[in-house]
Image (cartoon, grey):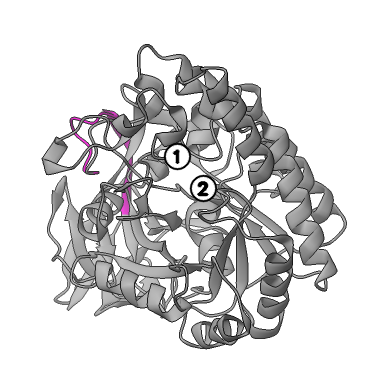
Amino acid sequence: MKTLIQGGTIVTAADAYKADVLVEGEKVALIGKRLPLSGAKKIDATGKYVIPGGIDVHTHMELPFGGTFASDDFETGTIAAAFGGTTSIIDFAVQSFGATLTAAIETWQKKARGKAVIDYGLHCIVRELDDNRLKEMDELVSAGVSSFKLFMAYPGVFMVDDATIFKAVTRTGENGGLICMHAENGGVIDVLIKKALKEKHTEPKWHALTRPPEAEGEATNRAFRLAEMAGQLPLYIVHLSAAQALEQVRLFRDRGLPAYAETCPQYLFLSYENYEEPGFDGAKYVMSPPLRPKWHQEELWKGLARNDLQVVSTDHCPFCMTEGYQGLPKQKQLGVGDFSKIPNGAPGVETRMVLLYDGGVLAKRITLNRWIELTSTTPAKLFGMFPRKGTIAVGSDADIVVWNPKTASTISAKTHHMRVDYNPYEGRKVKGKADVVLSRGEVIIDKDKFVGKKGRGRFLKRGSPILQT
């Protein structure tokens, strides 16, 4: 099947130019001006941008957490991603205690298989790491799972010690993988949570007050120090939220070390003030790390501008506020009367691209090319998918979005496609929209309609990271 995308402006991380794109089968076949139609299906992109599909390297579909599970599964979550202009995700497979890493990957592939509508990769969350699991890391890298997540937070659930981190980073230095780190000082946070509850502080805002930015800064420094001791090896900080953590990234990068980090839209557009919303509404924003005071936002934008932050992902992990929404069980309400029992996470996979376009590009905080770099190209490079994904080039997968820069809309839970009963950005007016979305050459979003097929998404076997300065 041939498709010709005509009349648009192609935008990549490096260029912006007017040209047509001919898609044959799953690949980009030709790029040029005034290409002949010659039997191809035509997509008119006049006045629009033609961009690489977004890549969200941090999602949690159907994640078990705190006695419940994330409300989006691989079907609803990937459909929502596609509506927002994202054509690939990387989710997280969680190792069970006493189980193998391979078993975790198999469990998550079963969750995704037959459901995902876009391509998906998997990171492996490591909770235990003996010698056999170290060997398994090598096998997983060879099988296309080239990144592993470790936690410095959630003692007794996810948190690992420094020795485990050191061993894991050392191993990825040998096998070509990449360690992703949740950097918060879990021991300190645990003490602060117990103290707050003892003093009868139960409201959602105490989730943030017991996870201070200094705890994130300290853990970020320690993570990079451990990677440095392991041989100046690469390490990637996930969902960075605080200026104190960003400062550590900058210091290590200024010394020439391979220090990388992502942030998320919630840390760029929301703030601690959201926790002060009346009643239990602050629970909508309970996530870890938490939202920070507003001044941190400007520091994060500076970090994006000077490339101390290389990626914007979402940490999409939605939980409903109301029991029974679309048949789902009690979720956020589990924490009524005890903030520590509120499931951590918020929706975002559908709104990432438009928030960064409207609040970044149109607000003149980032350039059009930087938008693509942060949301598609660098994610593809750091997580072993480039140039198959993350660009528009002959031979690349035809993951392409026709982006209408003029469409105005209002973000709302009433119109979004994520399976959750609220939107953190409710009422925000934005410009920009994914009009047409192609995944491997197949149109799956066409003018407000999902026209793809359930289960068409493929597992992404990824290589080693392409490291950048």
- Mark 2 lies on residue: 371
User: Residue 406, how many percent across, how many down?
Assistant: 32, 34
Q: Quadrant of the N terminus?
A: bottom left
- The answer to which of marks 1 and 2 sits earlier in the sequence is 1
Q: Residue at x 38, y 45 (%)?
A: 66
Residue 292 in view, yes or no: no
Question: Could you say whether the residue bearing mark 1 is in a helix, strand or loop?
Answer: helix
Evaluate if marks 1 and 2 touch, with contact meaning CB atoms under 8 Å apart: yes
Q: Amino acid at mark 1?
A: Tyr
Identify the residue shown where x is 70% and y is 71%. 169
Query: Residue furthest toward the right?
Result: 255
> What residue sits right under mark 1 in the picture?
357
Determine whether the residue tagged by mark 2 lies in a helix, strand or loop. helix
175 or 281, nearer to the observer: 281
CA–CA distance in space, label 1 to label 2? 7 Å
* Region rendered in magenta: 402-418
Q: Residue at x 27, y 53 (%)?
A: 77
Q: Amino acid at mark 2?
A: Trp
Say few, some or many: other residues with alpha carbon within 10 Å of mark 2 (under 14 / 14 to 19 / 20 or more). Answer: many
Q: Quadrant of the C terminus?
A: bottom right
Q: Residue at x 26, y 46 (%)?
A: 71
